[in-house]
Amino acid sequence: CNALEKDLNPIVPALDKLRKQVMASIGGWLKMIGRESDETIIKGIACRATNYRRFNDIPAERLRNIYNAFLNKQKDFVSVDKLASEELEYLSFLN
């Protein structure tokens, strides 16, 4: 059945992969900022970010956009945290 479905609609596996990537990127960001997360919370954030009512209705291009946005949020968080730590070390060195 799965093989037939893939033959009839090859876009479905690609969308499933994108959806999983989006969920992972949002989940990673939530974990990084110390917030609780589960499937419902993550899907809700994705829906609010894209203005879609249902997670499965989000088109591929929007999924790619929010996937990259949340990956960038994680990278920015790490960069800012590192910069702030270095600044605090420098200020404590001066005192």
Image (cartoon, rainbow, N blue to C red):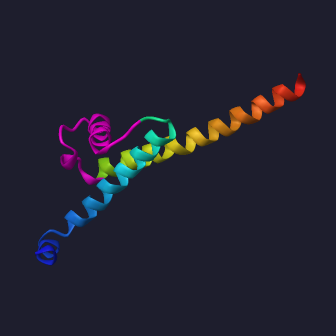
Q: Quadrant of residue 92?
A: top right
Q: Quick check: 58 left or right of 36?
A: left
Q: Which residues are magenta?
A: 36-60
Q: Residue 49 appears at what percent x and percent y?
A: 32, 36
The quarter of the rendered structure image containing the N terminus is: bottom left
Identify the residue shown where x is 21% and y is 65%.
11
Q: Quick check: 4 left or right of 13?
A: left
Q: Residue 67 appears at what percent x and percent y?
A: 39, 49
Residue 37 part of the magenta-drawn span: yes
**Dominant secondary-structure state across the stretch colored magenta:** helix
Identify the residue shown where x is 31% and y is 49%.
63
Q: Residue 56 appears at what percent x and percent y?
A: 19, 49
Identify the residue shown where x is 70% and y is 36%.
83
Q: Residue furthest top?
A: 95
Q: Quick check: 9 left or right of 95?
A: left
Q: Relative to 47, say whether 63 is above or below.
A: below
Q: Relative to 7, say whether 20 is above or below.
A: above
